[in-house]
């Protein structure tokens, strides 16, 4: 009899707790404009997972349900009567070419409402509400992930809604996140980012913010600033990945962990061997906020320590030892200072340090000593003019991916795709997020042998 009474009491307490949470959320949303509430509900429902995504197995949908890849609420909530075929599954698979014409027609007549930056600042004043309404993970998804922390540098300047979607998608409590927001960004966005970061122990704003100029040294310095902060955090992360605010993951956190384990201390940094653009490094350039980068006509001296410049990408996968080397090694520090007056130094600094085939005297941790052009680069996938077709639009010579690029993107082996815009064909971002969530619930078979057989991982093994 006593056991039954205790059991009944527990049930009553659980019901009361659930009801209290429900009423709290209802009250929290009462003072928000209707369009904001609708947008948040769409954002949370768009992956058809519980509000509190804490990865308890009983809360997860069945792997055979396909809920995540069905009609996204952005479509469903418009009450469109003939849109039941506009599913993420159809957009991701690419088996029906006409679906993209119909999806574009839908997006032309139905605009996704995005809340203002002030919304995020206001909701983040209540961290419980922020995490719960937007669906942040409260616990590691697995023991394997809990034991392998990753650091992320997020380099952002605009579109807070998209940045928050990116953070939410890659967020795990065992990882570390440094957000560098351009000091020129609007005050409302800066305030909101600080408010969001304050809700987490493992998310922070860079201690020093740069007024970033496109292709200027300040872009590289922003990453360095975050790296300085990242090595001081309590999280003992193994790798650091720098990510643009308009990039989006192609791998789940579990997939990242397993791939980085195979990397085993080696970096993944691009090299465009013998394709250095000499005008970028042979002449001095000045940063100006009004005119961008301005060539002075003054010739630069040679790089220090007989270093040969290797062109690459601003983004990469960096081992902890590499990051510490960048911050403390005198040759690396001298190269950074020399790069201050070059054009787009973020596209040569990492690559030059990493490729010891060209610069064997650097002794860089996790470096690649083979021919720089003998390996793929998998940190991020970007499409540049003159290569494959871009179905979205071109921006600064780079493809902004659209919905018709989705089948191509989900087949890639890279870790991130760069770039997407929430203001251009938002179904591309919505369905990519749904796909990542689906893979978290129903892990697919991944060809990890491909990563194990990379030129640098073979050396690691």
Image (cartoon, rainbow, N blue to C red):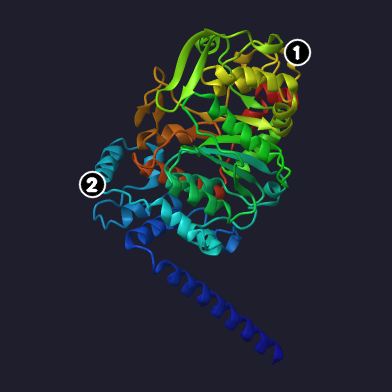
Up-down: is 349 above or below 139? above
Residue 250 seen: no
Q: Position of residue 214 (x, y in %)?
A: 46, 27
Quadrant occupied by the C terminus: top right
1 or 2: mark nearer the eye: 1
Residue 213 seen: yes
Up-down: is 79 above or below 29? above
Q: Position of residue 448 (x, y in %)?
A: 63, 34
Rendered residue at 42%/43% (across/down) = 159
Q: Is residue 5 left or right of residue 252?
A: right
Q: Position of residue 282 (x, y in %)?
A: 54, 8
> Which residue is the site of mark 1?
361
> Which residue is the site of mark 2?
109
Q: Quadrant of residue 177?
A: top right
Rendered residue at 55%/61% (across/down) = 127
Quadrant occupied by the N terminus: bottom right
Q: Secondary structure at mark 2?
A: helix
- Calculate the distance from the C-alpha at mark 1 to the C-alpha at mark 2: 59 Å
Q: Earlier in the sequence, mark 1 or mark 2?
A: 2
Q: Is residue 369 left or right of residue 124?
A: right
Q: Residues within 10 Å of mark 1 (few under 14, many from 20)?
A: few
Q: Position of residue 17 (x, y in %)?
A: 56, 76
| Extreme residue in the bottom direction | 1
Q: Residues within 10 Å of mark 2 (few under 14, many from 20)?
A: few
Up-down: is 200 above or below 307? below
Q: Quadrant of residue 198?
A: bottom right
**Contact between labelled residues 2 and 1, with CB atoms less than 8 Å apart:** no
Q: Secondary structure at mark 1?
A: helix
């Amino acid at each position: 009899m006593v056991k039954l009474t205790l059991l009944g009491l527990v049930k009553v307490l659980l019901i009361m707790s659930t009801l209290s949470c429900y009423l709290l959320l209802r009250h929290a949303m009462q003072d928000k404009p209707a369009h904001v509430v609708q947008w948040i509900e769409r954002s949370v429902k768009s992956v058809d997972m519980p509000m509190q995504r804490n990865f308890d197995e009983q809360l997860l949908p069945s792997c055979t349900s396909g809920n995540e890849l069905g009609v996204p609420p952005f479509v469903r909530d418009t009450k469109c009567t003939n849109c039941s075929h506009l599913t993420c599954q159809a957009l991701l698979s690419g088996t029906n070419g006409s679906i993209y014409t119909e999806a574009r027609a839908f997006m032309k007549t139905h605009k996704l409402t995005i809340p203002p930056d002030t919304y995020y600042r206001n909701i983040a004043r209540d961290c419980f509400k922020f995490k719960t309404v937007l669906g942040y993970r409260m616990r590691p998804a697995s023991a394997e992930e809990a034991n392998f922390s990753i650091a992320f540098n997020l380099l952002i300047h605009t579109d807070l809604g998209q940045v928050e979607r990116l953070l939410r998608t890659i967020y795990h409590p065992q990882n570390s996140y440094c957000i560098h927001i351009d000091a020129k960004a609007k005050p409302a966005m800066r305030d909101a980012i600080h408010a969001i970061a304050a809700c987490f122990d493992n998310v922070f704003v860079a201690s020093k913010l740069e007024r970033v100029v496109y292709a200027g040294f300040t872009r590289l310095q922003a990453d360095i600033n975050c790296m300085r902060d990242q090595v001081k955090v309590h999280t003992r992360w193994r790798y650091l990945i720098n990510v643009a605010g308009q990039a989006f993951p192609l791998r789940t956190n579990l997939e990242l962990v397993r791939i980085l384990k195979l990397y085993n201390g080696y970096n993944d940094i691009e090299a465009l061997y013998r394709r250095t653009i000499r005008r970028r490094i042979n002449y001095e350039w000045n940063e100006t906020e009004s005119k961008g980068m301005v060539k002075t006509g003054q010739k630069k001296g040679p790089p220090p320590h007989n270093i040969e410049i290797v062109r690459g990408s601003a983004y990469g996968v960096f081992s902890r030892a590499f990051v510490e080397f960048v911050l403390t090694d005198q040759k690396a520090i001298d190269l950074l200072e020399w790069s201050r007056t070059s054009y787009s130094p973020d596209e040569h600094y990492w690559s030059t340090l990493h490729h010891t085939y060209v610069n064997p005297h650097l002794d860089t941790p996790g470096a690649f000593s083979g021919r720089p052009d003998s390996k793929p680069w998998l940190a991020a996938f970007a499409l540049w003019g003159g290569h494959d077709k871009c179905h979205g639009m071109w921006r600064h010579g780079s493809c902004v991916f659209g919905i018709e690029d989705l089948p191509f993107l989900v087949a890639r082996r890279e870790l991130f795709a760069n770039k997407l815009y929430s203001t251009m064909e938002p179904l591309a971002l919505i369905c990519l997020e749904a796909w990542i969530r689906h893979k978290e619930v129903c892990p697919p078979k991944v060809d990890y042998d491909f990563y194990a057989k990379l030129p640098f991982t073979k050396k690691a093994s």
